[in-house]
Amino acid sequence: MPCAYVLRSKKTGKQYVGSSHSDSAAKRVAEHNAGKSRWTKAGMPWILVHEEYFESYTEARKRENFLKSGQGRKQIKESLGGVAEPG
């Protein structure tokens, strides 16, 4: 089942929003922590702070794009108690 997820870097405190075709956000976190993504390589290690599952990958991508928008970042910050912003 496709998902959208939010990661936080233990190193920098920054967040990363992504989506996956696979049925496990944890699998994607492992790939990010293995350095398989050039966008997240510098922030390793990453922890999973939020995940949502969808019926289709298209829905997951729409949610990912929303979470990357200004309103989406605000929603993440409010729902996670400020975890989305570096402290």
Image (cartoon, helix red, strand yellow):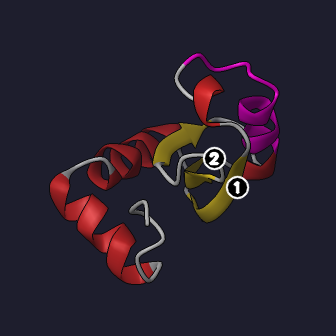
Quadrant in which the C terminus appears:
bottom left
- Relative to residue 31, is residue 18 drawn left or right? left
- Residue drawn at 47 percent across, 49 percent down: 14
Picture layout, residue 47 above or below residue 46: below
Q: Which mark is residue 47?
A: 1
Say which amino acid is labelled 1.
Answer: Ile
Find numbered disc 1 in the image and state the secondary structure of the residue it sits on. strand
Q: CA distance from mark 1 to mark 2?
A: 10 Å
Residue to which mark 2 is pinned: 11
Does the segment drawn in magenta span residue 37? yes
As for residue 50 lying within the magenta part, the answer is: no
Extent of the magenta region: 27-38
Q: Secondary structure at mark 2?
A: loop
Q: Which mark is residue 3?
A: none
Query: The residue under label 2 is which amino acid type?
Result: Lys
User: Picture quarter containing residue 72?
Assistant: bottom left
Frontmost residue, 81 versus 69: 81
